[in-house]
Amino acid sequence: MKSGKCLKWSLVLFACLGVTLFTLNPSTVRAASKPIKWVLSTPFGSESYGGKGTAWIIERIKKNSNGQLQIEPYYASSLGYKSPEYLKVFRDGLMDMAELSPPHAMGTEPLFGACILPFTFFSYDDYYDFAQKVLMPNLSEVVEKKWNIKLIGNLMYAQTAFYGQKAITKPEDFKGLKVRVMSPLGRDIYAKLGAQPIYIPFEELYTALQRGVVQAMPNSLTAAADVKVWEVCSNASLIGYVIGTGFMVVNKKSFDALPKNLQDVVLEAGSAYSRHMKEEIKKMGNAALMQYLEHGMTLTKMPPPVLKELRAAAADVWLSWTKKVGPRAEKILKEGGLLIR
């Protein structure tokens, strides 16, 4: 009798254990048994500002997840996908994480033009607030459903200067000047000021300045230092506006498949990454200015009347952009306090 009772309770216990094991969340079991591995692609090299930020967030996620989420990076688009293809690659679920460059993405998703509108904010803190409170929420509402992308953090690009053989002291100095531009937005602004805008790829920039194909250019402090601008330009007129922002993004389906504790790790890392990159770009901008001085460049501040003319021309371009892109674009300008007319 006693042995029968033992057998009965053993069967009950075994059944309960069987039900418990069967109903465990499969993702939790997977996380506990072996690490989840993601693939990340970035268009930038490992030693670049963006590349170093990528390494930083990968390490933070690995550490805070106790190694349960490991990310394998492919720098300089070595995974085989080019930056303009990233949106379609995410939509098709072909990679888990990326450093997304809006200038490369806006041809596929025009709303990303909001991230590189010229002459919007003139301090890193102001742009950071704009990116976190306006850009990321508005873009997320579109790209999560349309492109299977979740934005988790942003990396601002450096402040700008206008490089040439002489300082810009008045609006008339732009008249007839052959200016290198990076996008249709910049083209329209400098055309309004009477300049001759010319599109030159970054890879051809140094030679174009050296040979006089273009006479001047606006560019970020860091990008200009990367091409050794002091060898082809003697003056930098400091503009100060923050040239824009990129994003650290994850595949939404990959994110949703994570256990809740790992989702929290990814989101925390994205927020920390945004703050970290803001401080890093400040340091890098200041280091670039020191390089200019060390190599004999003349640094001047662009006078307020010139900045006023540039921003007025830019405001027209912003409005034109909203008309092409639609109501969401206008909403971004309004929430960012950029509808100045």
Image: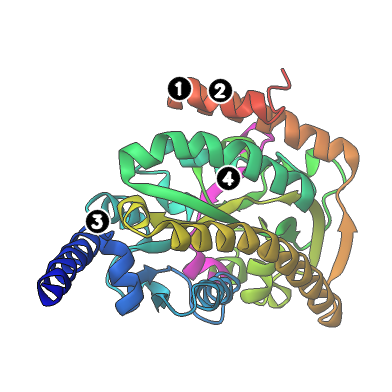
The percent coordinates of residue 310 (x first, y second) are: 74, 37
Identify the disc placed on residue 93: 3
Disc 2 residue crowd, few under 14, some 14–19, many 20+, Cα 10 Å: some
Q: Are marks 1 and 4 in contact (CB under 8 Å)?
A: no
- Give the structural element (helix, strand or loop) at label 2: helix
On whether residue 258 falls in the magenta region, the answer is no
> What residue type is disc 1 on?
Gly
Q: Which residue is mark 2?
A: 330
Q: Which residue is mark 1?
A: 326
> What residue type is disc 3 on?
Gly
The answer to whether residue 162 shows anywhere in this view is yes
- Reply above or below: 219 against 53: above
Residue at the (76%, 73%) spot, across then down: 288
Q: Are marks 2 and 1 in contact (CB under 8 Å)?
A: yes
Left or right, 28 with respect to 295, comes to left
* Badge 1 or badge 4: first in the primary sequence: 4
Left or right, 25 with respect to 104, comes to left
Disc 1 residue crowd, few under 14, some 14–19, many 20+, Cα 10 Å: few
Q: Are marks 4 and 2 in contact (CB under 8 Å)?
A: no
Disc 3 residue crowd, few under 14, some 14–19, many 20+, Cα 10 Å: some
Q: Which residue is mark 4?
A: 116
> What residue type is disc 4 on?
Ile
- Give the structural element (helix, strand or loop) at label 4: helix
